[in-house]
């Protein structure tokens, strides 16, 4: 198990630095300059600013300096916010995105599990087909479409919930529902498939032959075994929720890191784009690492190559 953990940790570190490198190089390919009013500046003024921020140095030198600062917790200063540290801006906005993501993932997992379990137990019935139609719609239709529909019907037309901002608990309902649709659909589909497979397995047949009640079979054997593969997708789903909040935060005027990231792209705020991407990537890789370890603990039979 120790070897397995160390192996996964090694992959995590390598993957992280590959992402940092590719993101840094991609920033150099962006057109334009990161300076406001650059069109009104002279070439000398732009050259002075490049020298101030170290953008006149060779790319390998810039890269090594950035990585060195990153390892010390310094992600640079924002061009858009007149030199404010990127870490400070992220520290203010990221908790809002995390809070929205947690609410969406909890709602999505609970509803998705219920739909998946129900569909698996009622296989090939109208309830099964209805649940899968909901799952297909949730995967096929982008979350921003749901967001626009919810805003119109529940916000504008019937005025049940506020349509924007992040001021009261009521403001969080529509964004959370919009983000949770993909989670509901994905979890329901996975859970339904696993429930059908588990209910047809030999040990379920044996349990039925022993006279164990249906409720005991469902809760003690079926759900417990069917939910294991679902756990592996929760990590990526959570990160997808956070990254997927980019558009949702913009639609609902939520002052999270997603909304800030979109603004940074418009303004070519390289340090902010880099810093946000690094935080997203680190979180994604860390969650995948944790899920891998938990999956191995929950089901000891599962080890990746070389993990034994």
Image (spheres, helix red, strand yellow):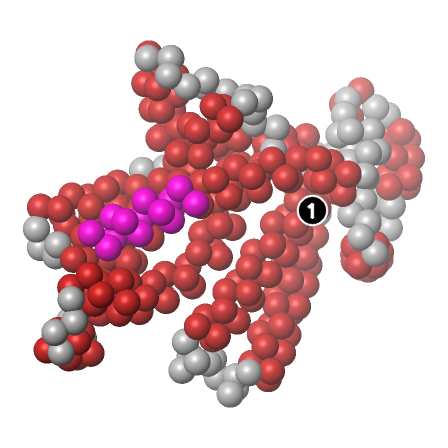
Image x and y of residue 203, in percent? 20, 78
Q: Is residue 241 left or right of residue 55?
A: left
Tell me which corner region of the image, top left, top right, bottom left or bottom right, holds residue 36.
Answer: top right
Q: Is residue 117 left or right of residue 70?
A: left
The answer to whether residue 68 is magenta is no
Q: Secondary structure at mark 1?
A: helix
Residue ID at (48%, 75%): 297
Give the residue furthest to the left: 125
In the depicted structure, whether residue 13 falls above or below residue 37: below
Image x and y of residue 275, in percent? 70, 46
Image x and y of residue 188, in percent? 28, 51
Q: Is residue 123 left or right of residue 4?
A: left
Crowd rating for badge 1 (residues with CA inside 10 Å; few <14, some 14–19, many 20+): many
Q: In this view of the protein, which residue sits in the foreground, 21 or 7?
A: 7
Q: Which residue is mark 1?
A: 274
Residue ID at (59%, 84%): 3
**One can see residue 27 in this view:** no
Q: Is residue 201 left or right of residue 285?
A: left
In the depicted structure, whether residue 51 falls above or below residue 297: above
Question: In terms of secondary structure, what is the magenta stretch mainly?
Answer: helix
Residue ID at (58%, 74%): 8
Quadrant housing the N terminus: bottom right
In the depicted structure, whether residue 78 falls above or below residue 116: above
Image x and y of residue 215, in percent? 19, 61
Residue ID at (66%, 50%): 279
Region rendered in magenta: 106-118
**Count of numbered marks:** 1
């Amino acid at each position: 198990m120790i070897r397995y953990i160390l192996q996964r940790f090694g992959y995590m570190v390598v993957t992280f630095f590959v992402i940092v490198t590719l993101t840094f190089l991609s920033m150099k390919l962006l057109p334009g300059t990161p300076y406001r009013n650059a069109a009104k500046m002279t070439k000398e003024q732009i050259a002075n600013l490049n020298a101030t921020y170290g953008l006149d140095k060779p790319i390998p030198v810039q890269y090594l300096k950035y990585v060195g600062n990153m390892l010390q917790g310094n992600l640079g200063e924002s061009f858009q916010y007149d030199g404010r540290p990127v870490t400070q801006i992220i520290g203010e906005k990221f908790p809002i995105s995390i809070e929205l993501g947690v609410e969406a993932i909890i709602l999505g997992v609970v509803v998705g599990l219920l739909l998946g379990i129900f569909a698996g137990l009622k296989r090939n019935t109208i309830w099964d087909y209805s649940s899968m139609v909901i799952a297909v719609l949730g995967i096929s239709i982008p979350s921003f479409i749901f967001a626009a529909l919810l805003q119109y019907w529940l916000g504008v037309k019937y005025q049940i919930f506020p349509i924007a901002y992040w001021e009261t608990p009521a403001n969080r309902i529509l964004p959370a529902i919009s983000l949770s649709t993909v989670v509901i659909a994905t979890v329901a589909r996975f859970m339904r498939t696993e429930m059908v497979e588990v209910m047809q397995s030999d040990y379920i047949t044996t349990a039925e032959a022993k006279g164990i009640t249906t409720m005991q079979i469902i809760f003690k054997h079926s759900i417990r075994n069917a939910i294991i593969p679902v756990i592996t997708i929760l990590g990526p789903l959570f990160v997808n929720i956070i990254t997927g909040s980019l558009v949702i935060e913009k639609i609902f005027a939520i002052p999270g890191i997603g909304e800030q990231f979109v603004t940074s792209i418009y303004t070519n705020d390289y340090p902010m784009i880099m810093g946000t991407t690094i935080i997203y990537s680190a979180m994604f890789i860390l969650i995948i690492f944790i899920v891998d370890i938990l999956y191995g603990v929950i089901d000891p039979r599962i080890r990746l190559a070389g993990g034994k």
